[in-house]
Image (cartoon, rainbow, N blue to C red):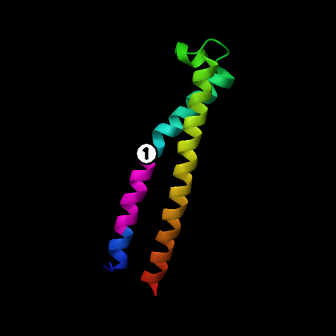
Amino acid sequence: MHHTPEVQLQTLKQQLAKVQLIEAPGTIMFGLGLYGKFAANGNAFHPLLNDPGVVSMLLGAGGTVMAWGTYKLVTILREMQRVKKRLAL
């Protein structure tokens, strides 16, 4: 089934919004991990952020989600550019 460029752009915008929603918790996890690793100095606002194992897990999981999100965002944005070029022709 072949969609018009306008429909493709709308679909890509929806995919972009979904990826951004999925990526947001990863960014928060990564940020909390950085806080626990470098800023808390054993006096974090939550006791779990003083645990090096939890901090490493936050950095690893958050970083992984952020890397996946970046890959998906770049892929979707490239496809949007291709569709926009076809639409302009």
- 66 shown above or below 76: above
Quarter of the rendering containing residue 4: bottom left
Q: Please state which of residues 67 and 5 is positioned toward the viewer in this rendering.
A: 67
The residue segment tinted magenta is: 10-21
Viewer-side residue, 26 vs 60 = 60
What is the x, y in percent for residue 67?
Answer: 58, 48
Please say whether residue 15 is one of the residues in the magenta stretch.
Answer: yes
| Quarter containing the N terminus | bottom left
Q: Position of residue 30 (x, y in %)?
A: 57, 34
Dot 1: within a 10 Å radius of its alpha carbon, few (fewer than 14), some, or many (20 or more) residues?
Answer: some
Q: Residue at x 34, y 67 (%)?
A: 10
User: What residue appears at the point 46 percent right and 88 percent down from the top-left corner?
Assistant: 89
Above or below, 4 against 26 in this view is below
Q: Residue at x 56, y 28 (%)?
A: 32
Label 1 belongs to which residue?
22
Q: Amino acid at mark 1?
A: Ile
Q: Find residue 86 and report its horizontal and vertical position in percent.
A: 46, 82
- The residue that appears at 51% across and 39% down in the rendered structure is 26
Query: Could you say where residue 24 lies in the image, as x and y percent from the top left?
Result: 47, 41
Main SS, magenta residues: helix
Q: Secondary structure at mark 1?
A: helix
Q: Quadrant of residue 7?
A: bottom left
